[in-house]
Image (cartoon, helix red, strand yellow):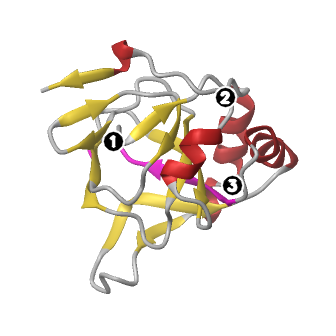
């Protein structure tokens, strides 16, 4: 099974990006209790919810924890699996976003269901990468992949290095 599924779910990215930028000052450097010495100052996380995000979760029929992620230009998120998250809905809000990598395969995307239990990484380009992530804790990627609405898998979205 692929590590992600592209979703044909359209959001008002401008509205979500405006929400993300309006709360960016409250974002903090990413940390992970599995790695007490890890603190990525160029990768910020901001917990946030709104009526717009609740509508997205309702439309996709998922229950999760929403947050915005802000990855600074040229920052690197090392290969990892997410802590306690079985899968997530990821929505890229900025243009020219760097892809997510699974091993040597890069995936460019707008909106996806992501298997967060598989090792993945991001090496950012010269643009800030802002993303809405809805972390899902109580349903597996496989189960959600079988039932999720707005599913499609465009072949043009992957690129081998």
Label 2: element kind: helix
Local crowd size for mark 3, using a 10 Å CA cut-off: few (<14), some (14–19), many (≥20): few
**At x 68% / y 60%, what residue is drawn?**
64
Residue 38 location, quadrant? bottom left
* Residue 50 placement (x, y as % from top left): 82, 51
Along the line of sight, which residue is nearer the eye, 47 or 143? 143
Q: Name which of mark 1 and mark 3 comes first in the sequence.
A: 3
**At x 17% / y 25%, what residue is drawn?**
160
Number of numbered callouts drawn: 3
Read off the magenta span. 64-74
* Residue 118 placement (x, y as % from top left): 32, 55
Q: In which quadrant will I find the N terminus?
A: top left
Residue projecting furthest to the right: 51
Q: Is residue 70 magenta?
A: yes
Q: Name which of mark 3 and mark 2 comes first in the sequence.
A: 2
Reading the image, the residue beneath label 3 is 23
Name the mark nearer the viewer: 3 or 2.
2
Mark 3 and mark 2: span between their CA atoms? 15 Å
**Rendered position, 84 above or below 146:** below
Disc number at residue 73?
Answer: 1
**At x 57% / y 28%, what residue is drawn?**
7
* Residue 46 placement (x, y as % from top left): 60, 61
> Would you say 31 lies left or right of 79 here?
right
**Rendered position, 103 above or below 150:** below
Reading the image, the residue beneath label 2 is 13
Label 1: element kind: loop
Residue 52 location, quadrant? top right
Q: Is residue 35 magenta?
A: no
Disc number at residue 148?
Answer: none
**Rendered position, 139 above or below 21:** below
Asked if marks 2 and 1 touch (Cβ < 8 Å), the reply is no
């Amino acid at each position: 099974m692929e590590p992600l599924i592209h979703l044909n779910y359209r959001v008002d990215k401008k509205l979500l990006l405006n929400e993300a930028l309006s709360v960016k000052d409250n974002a903090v450097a990413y940390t992970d209790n599995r790695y007490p010495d890890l603190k990525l100052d160029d990768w910020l996380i901001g917990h946030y919810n709104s009526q717009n995000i609740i509508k997205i979760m309702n439309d996709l029929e998922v229950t999760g924890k929403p947050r915005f992620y802000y990855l600074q230009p040229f920052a690197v998120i090392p290969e990892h699996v997410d802590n306690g998250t079985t899968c997530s809905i990821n929505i890229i809000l900025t243009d020219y976003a760097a892809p997510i990598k699974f091993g040597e395969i890069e995936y460019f995307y707008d909106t996806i269901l992501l298997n967060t239990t598989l090792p993945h990484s991001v090496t950012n380009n010269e643009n800030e990468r802002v993303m809405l992530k809805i972390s899902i804790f109580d349903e597996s990627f496989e189960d959600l992949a079988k039932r999720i609405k707005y599913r499609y898998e465009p072949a043009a979205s992957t690129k081998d290095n």
